[in-house]
Image: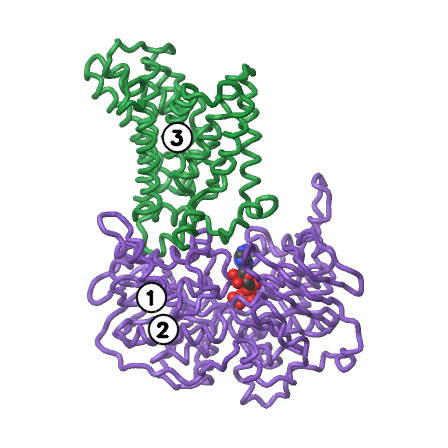
Chain colours: A purple, B green
Amino acid sequence: MKRAYFDCRASWPSYARRDQATEPPLTRQSDPAGRGAQARPGVLVLDGIAKRYGTTVALRRVNLRLDAGRVHALLGENGAGKSTLVRIVVGAAAPDEGEMRLGGAALRLGSARDGIAAGIVPVYQHLSLFPHLTVRENLSAFAYGRTGPLALRPPLVAAETARRWLDAVGLDRDLATPVERLSVGERQLVEIARAIGQDCRVLLLDEPTAALSDRERDRLFLAVRRLCERGTAILFISHKLDEIDTVADDLTVLRDGESVIEGVGRETVGRADLVRAMLGTAVNTGAHALGTPGPLMLCARSLRVAPSDPPTNIAVRRGEVLGLAGLVGSGALRIAEALSGLRPVASGSVEIDGAALLPGDRRHAVRLGIGLIPADRSTDGLFAVRSASDNVSASALSLLSRAGLLRGRAERNMVAPWLQRLGLNPPEPERRAASFSGGNQQKLLVARNLLVPGLRALVALEPTRGVDIAARRLIHEALAEAASAGVAIVLASTDLDEVEALSHRILVVDAGRVVADLPRGAGHPALLAAMGGGGARAA
Amino acid sequence: MRALRRLAGAVPPSAPVALAIFLLFALVVPRFATAGNLENVLRIASILAIASCGQAIVLVLGGVEFSFGASAALSSVLAVSALPDVGPVGALAIGVATVAVIGTVNGWLVSRFDLPPFLVTLGALMIASGLAASLAGGLPIDAPPSAAFAWLARGRVAGIPVPIVAAVLVLFGTHVLLRHTRIGRIWCLVGANPVAARLSGLPTRSAVVAGYGTAGLLVGLAAAILTSRVASGQPGLAPNLAFETIAACAIGGIPLAGGQGRAANVLFGVAVIAMLNNAVVLLNLPVAYQQIAIAVVILAAVLLQRDGWPGGLWTRFGRKGARS
Ligand SMILES: Nc1ncnc2c1ncn2[C@@H]1O[C@H](COP(=O)(O)OP(=O)(O)OP(=O)(O)O)[C@@H](O)[C@H]1O
Ligand SMILES: [Mg+2]
């Protein structure tokens, strides 16, 4: 397992190491027809697509052309309309205006099933696998869609075929493994393998890397490249510009539902221009000023989260941002969750300002002033059918009520400044949360946890998952400011740049154990070395 | 402008449906729009409205209550059996408490053991109806004539029948509870996403128990009014009560998925059902038609209020998809 990990690295270095890497740039060799792109008709062509939801205009006028064998990046700020476009292309939503052509023929889709049958396969950020079924059963899922409802033997794909698909994406897993045992990155690879089996002509990847570690992301990119070589047209959505540089051939930028840059070669647009096209302004990328930590605030004493973990001591001081880094399955997430009171522990204790936390009791933790931004937005965080405002105020209801009655004005006054500050788009607190774009939903969760009454500690898991670069900056500033105000912050993120930018120090976790304690500015190589060091499990 | 928009948001899509049905019946159903008939409609609807407020709370919590009919029957049997010993007030209190206790136990089972509300309340239905039947020996128990006991169903306050007054108070109370209290907000949040509610530090378990308990309290009140009206302890008091309350909530626009719902939804849902029932009677149609009509209306109402076609009709009212 460890072997495979390093092999993968060698052939596919992370973008984070690109600047120092001696390997040649990793793209383009798989671009057989690249130069002729302008002359060819394009596999999928969208012309003047528009989509409204009630009074909201999600897409105004979008043109897009995807070519065979090329990765086309779709960029745009939160709420620009990227996911809406994906839903339309795959048939899950119908456009109000505009035309789509697939391989030259007009394309009309009644449902996502039609889209998949036509060879247009989406990989959403929230996964669409069946967790209790095995890898092989999941790979056969599209085939089920084509059989009659009473077919006696569901057409399970042959083992060799399934194996071949998995090989194509570089996933080395037993076919009988239930999907729920795979990591997020592995599940995404299964989805892509399934797309390969479908002979997919167009693969749509909506923020596939938002929850991936560097290593998993590299593996994903490798699979994407392989698929490209088979002539698939790929649409790739991400807010991380480094990834766009690594993987994209062409790019399109959406702004307020309009394509403002349409299908140009990636190298023809400079990064500053790209950011301006997306946001209308430049984004300050300077380092964050961090205050000086004060006395001890949050600590774990001889903490063992899982019975097999070694006892761990962790101390976070008032005003300190402690980064937790580790590969998927390293236990970093586990420890962070235990610190927030989310997870029961095997032994040991968590204390905040001297008071012991009842493990696994979030209610008690919140009463002690511990906020938690959960990693899985839709299952653990969002109240999808409630308004944005309700989503934000949920943590502060006790503060907002008197004698059991909610004070409406106080609630509005508390919520509005935060929504404004984090740039909620559209700025309508009474809109229901489900109708906001992914990044804007994330802002609601961040605001909710900064509002915890008497906030003393904040455990932030992937706090900027899916948000655009401007919002990422705003969230980072809000976290840094909370720290300056004396909050102890535990930051666990697969985004190492984020951990480095915000943390006073970084603990590297491996197999449930803290293996390194790096000071601020130790640098990426030191961090990667510490993470790769102690015989990490592959999943 | 803001107040206007808020008002528009507060009027559920079922309101124009109820209004249309009212106008239609007023035109085509003889004797429908007479004062006497309308008072009668309201009087009958008031009991359903009170019980439906209870169902609405449970639905908002993401649950469902099937035991209302059976616990109402048990409540009526217990109240009437106790009447000679404890007097009318005590008897009615026992009746109300019976349903409240059953509701609370249901809520406790659901929240403590994470059991599906469907199964828990179905179990409660069977137990309560079994108990009611065995206590009553299968036959209604007649209540001794008592003016005080009958007041709840037949009395008037300022000229308005007591059940109607009670329904108005309960609807208003439910509105305040769901929209303007902390516990009501917690019910909504738990119904919308129980995991997120727990991680946000909300007291989800006690909220669920309180919700089912409150629902029981309201249904207990409805049962007391019914018992007072029939002046007997009936083991088969209102066998379809649970289903009628679910129907009223669904027609009124409360999604069964939880997290949303207002007293206004209940109001208009109940109005639709009551008018349909009344029209069937006035037109001398077989009672079976009543049920068929209600079934059709439920499906139509749910379809109309869905976000996609053809309900876009309603969401396009400038309501911006916020039905919270
Ligand atoms: N079901 C819906 N009802 C109302 N508005 C919607 C709905 N779905 C999307 N929208 C609106 O359409 C716009 C585009 O949303 P979309 O999800 O496509 O953005 P996005 O570019 O994917 O953003 P992100 O980067 O945050 O994922 C947003 O303003 C959003 O509020
Ligand atoms: Mg999106």
Same subunit, tags 1 and 3: no
Q: Residue A388: give x, y in percent of width and height.
A: 42, 58
Q: Amino acid at mark 2?
A: Ala
Viewed as shown, does residue A222 lie left or right of A284? right
Q: Secondary structure at mark 2?
A: helix
Label 1, label 3: how far apart the Cα atoms are: 41 Å
Q: Which mark is residue A450?
A: 1
Residue under the image location 31 percent in, 62 percent down: A414
Q: Secondary structure at mark 3?
A: helix
Residue under the image location 24 percent in, 12 percent down: B146
Label 1 crowd (10 A; few <14 / some 14-19 / many >=20): many
Q: Secondary structure at mark 1?
A: helix
1 and 2 marks in contact (CB < 8 Å): yes
Q: Which mark is residue B49?
A: 3
| Chain letter of the residue beneath label 3 in the structure image | B
| Chain letter of the residue beneath label 2 in the structure image | A
Is residue A194 visible in the rendered structure shown here?
A: no
Which residue is labeled 2 in the image? A478
Ligand 1 sits in quadrant: bottom right
Image position of B210 with respect to A500: above or below? above
Viewed as shown, does residue A21 lie left or right of B229? right
